[in-house]
Image: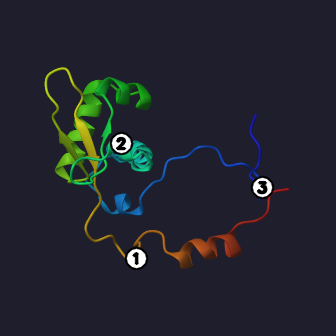
């Protein structure tokens, strides 16, 4: 069963979608969702001081089979998406040796866009007042 969202509704767990990902046209949706999952896991690592390296950089462990299972994708699809994220310098993987998972460092762009070309506050604000009607 589904319910309408109300001001007092409890929001379920969610992933954060960084707006800068909208600006990267040549990164597919699988890679973007994978980045969101890795960012979510990195935030957990950030809260736990145990998951920082000697330089103070936060890292995480997430095996390819576990990522494939979490995303309901093949391991090859996950490997391709990880490679795409590395090419865009959004993650860095550090090998730990044979039989050990790589450390994954989640990165973000040096200069974040100050304005969003696709979703401005003016555009989204006017959607509510001009076009959206209340559902009763």
Q: Which residue is situated farthest in the bottom direction here?
A: 122
Badge number at residue 6? 3
Quarter of the image with the C terminus is: bottom right
- Mark 3: few/some/many CA within 10 Å (<14, 14-19, 20+): few
Quarter of the figure that contains the N terminus: top right
Which quadrant holds residue 113?
Answer: bottom left
* Residue 50 placement, left or right of 80: right
Instruction: Specify the farthest residue to the right.
Output: 136
Q: Would you say the residues marked 1 and 2 are in contact, meaning their CB atoms lie under 8 Å apart? A: no
Residue that extends furthest to the top in the rendered view of this protein: 99
User: Relative to 105, is 123 above or below?
Assistant: below
Q: Which residue sits at x=37%, y=60%?
A: 22
Residue 36 image position (x, y, % from top left): 41, 47
Q: Describe the element under mark 3 as helix, strand or loop.
A: loop
Residue annotated with mark 1: 115
Q: How many marks?
A: 3
Q: CA distance from mark 1 to mark 2?
A: 36 Å
Residue placed under numbered mark 2 in the picture: 50
Residue 33, position as x, y percentages in the image:
40, 44
Mark 1 residue element: loop
Give the mark nearest the N terminus, 3 or 1.
Answer: 3
The disc, 3 or 2, on the residue closer to the chain's N-terminal end is: 3
- Tag 3–tag 2 contact (CB < 8 Å): no
Q: CA distance from mark 3 to mark 1?
A: 29 Å
Q: Nearer the viewer, residue 134 or 59?
A: 59
Residue at horizontal 78 percent and vertical 55 percent from the top: 8
Q: Secondary structure at mark 2?
A: helix
């Amino acid at each position: 069963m589904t319910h309408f969202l109300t001001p007092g509704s409890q929001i379920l767990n969610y992933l954060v979608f960084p707006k800068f990902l909208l600006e990267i046209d040549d990164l597919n949706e699988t890679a973007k969702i994978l980045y969101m999952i890795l960012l979510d896991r990195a935030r957990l690592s950030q809260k736990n001081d145990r998951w920082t390296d000697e330089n103070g950089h936060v890292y995480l462990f997430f095996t390819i089979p576990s990522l494939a299972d979490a995303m309901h994708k093949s391991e090859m699809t996950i490997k391709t998406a990880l490679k795409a994220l590395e090419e865009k310098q959004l993650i860095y993987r550090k090998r730990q040796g044979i039989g050990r998972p790589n450390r994954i460092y989640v990165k973000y762009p040096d200069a974040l866009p100050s304005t969003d070309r696709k979703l401005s506050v003016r555009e989204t604000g006017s959607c509510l007042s001009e076009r959206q009607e209340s559902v009763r």
